[in-house]
Amino acid sequence: MFFLRPTSKRRSLLLGCFIMIVVRTMLFVVHFYKEETARTRKPVRLRAGGEESPVQTSTSDSYVEWNEEDFPKPQRKRLILYWSGVRGHKVPVQKTAVNHTHFWPFFYAGKPGECPVPCELSSDQSRAQEASAFVVHARPPDISNLPPIENLAPWILQTNENPVYTPAMYNSRIMSQFNLLISYRLDSDFPAPIYPIPELHTPVPFHKRQGGVLAIFSKCEPVRTEYMRQLMRYIQVDSYGACLKNKDGLIGLYGKVNNRYVFKDHKLILSRYYKFSLVFMNQDCDYFIDDRLYHALTTGSVPVFMGTDKVDQYLPGNLKNAIIKVSDFRSPKELAAYLEYLSNNETAYNRYLEWKWKGIGDISNTTIGRWWRPRYPLFCQVCMSLAKGKLHRGLKLDYCQPRTYVDWGLEDPNNGFTDYYSMIVYGVLYCL
């Protein structure tokens, strides 16, 4: 009984243990909540700043393919006015029939007479009174430059960056004002991803590849950078970008030669001599794909892909077996072992390149195929939609949870103290 009599020292020790147990429990609850939120990807509806409730209308579920006979003659001319800039720069409207899928944001409405609906694209703000619709780029600072509301013409939003980096996409006050969406999303009104059709260039033969795994990231998003760090423990990764850089020899992202940006040209040459390219998107948002995937496929450097689980919709026909998905592996170690196996097995490796010899195949009934081989240029399609009056009263809010370490089977490197904390708690309890 004497042993159980509380003393000031024993009370302090018990109080300390109790506080540690409470803190440990709270940490567990917070960690569980974060894991569950990341796993289920439930949208978090923001209410900061007194925003209104989310607009309940939605974007198109499928691509609309108009025919010329759907538009009886004569049709009045539609003027689409690109009201904002793009990344702070004035829009350079394209006047020639270039392959517009290679030049985002594809400022092209077609040659005179090419579109079933007379259509013109302009960035001349002095023509606001003539405009049939206004287009605004969704990223800052452009989204702050909204059209004059007194013109009463429809507003069109254009984006090729995901909502994690584009707050306007989940701002109900902004989204409620727009009537059509041009986006990387394949379920938008006008799908227009920065992802051209991969080219059928003959790849460098297996035995002539000088490198194994290539990485070029200039923006060090924490999760993909940590995954690459752990992958480097088990296999050689040549990193030419700013993130975990261990190789020189590639011109910088904004490097110029003869006053021309040549980073991507140099990247395409370099990647031809690597067996694999890490194609890690900066987030895992639905449908988010950019031209990194095109670069790897075109050069024959097998893509090792981290990103949206909807990536298969961007791989029609014979491209369906052209990539390695990080999500198919439980850990960087397991992925590294598979890459090592392919590096020493030419037959197994070349299965990922069969499409180079077979061709891409029939892609006509896919949304991405219709983007790659469109019947009409992008802004001609917009004019056709305007002529049909196909508009929304506001756009659906687009949410995306930022990527977490647990999404990709990683321990958070910033939480290394947790194990030590557990040891202290359980050690004290054991002593008691």
Image: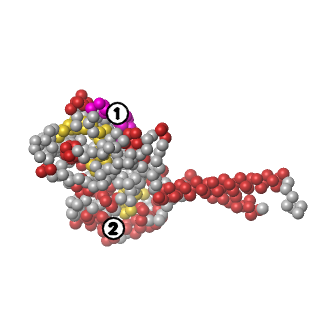
User: Which residue does the numbered mark 2 point to in the structure image?
Assistant: 349
Q: Which residues are magenta?
A: 138-151
Q: Position of residue 373 (x, y in %)?
A: 20, 54
* Residue found at x 79% / y 52%: 12
| Residue closest to the far top | 126
Q: Is residue 140 magenta?
A: yes
- Report the amino acid beneath label 2: Tyr
Q: Position of residue 165 (x, y in %)?
A: 41, 45
- Report the amino acid beneath label 1: Asn
User: Which residue does the numbered mark 1 point to in the structure image?
Assistant: 145
Q: Position of residue 325 (x, y in %)?
A: 39, 62
Depth check: give the residue in front, 413 or 244. 413
Vertical arrangement, residue 95 with respect to residue 162, above or below: above
Is residue 243 visible to us here?
no
Residue 357 falls in image quadrant: bottom left
Residue 171 falls in image quadrant: top left
Residue 363 falls in image quadrant: bottom left
Depth check: give the residue in front, 193 or 290. 193
* Residue found at x 37% / y 66%: 343
Relative side of 240 to 29, left or right: left
Depth check: give the residue in front, 250 or 149. 149
Tag 2: Cα neighbours inside 10 Å, few (<14), some, or many (≥20)?
some
Q: How is colour applied across the structure in the image?
A: secondary structure
* Residue found at x 73% / y 55%: 18
* Residue found at x 25% / y 38%: 133
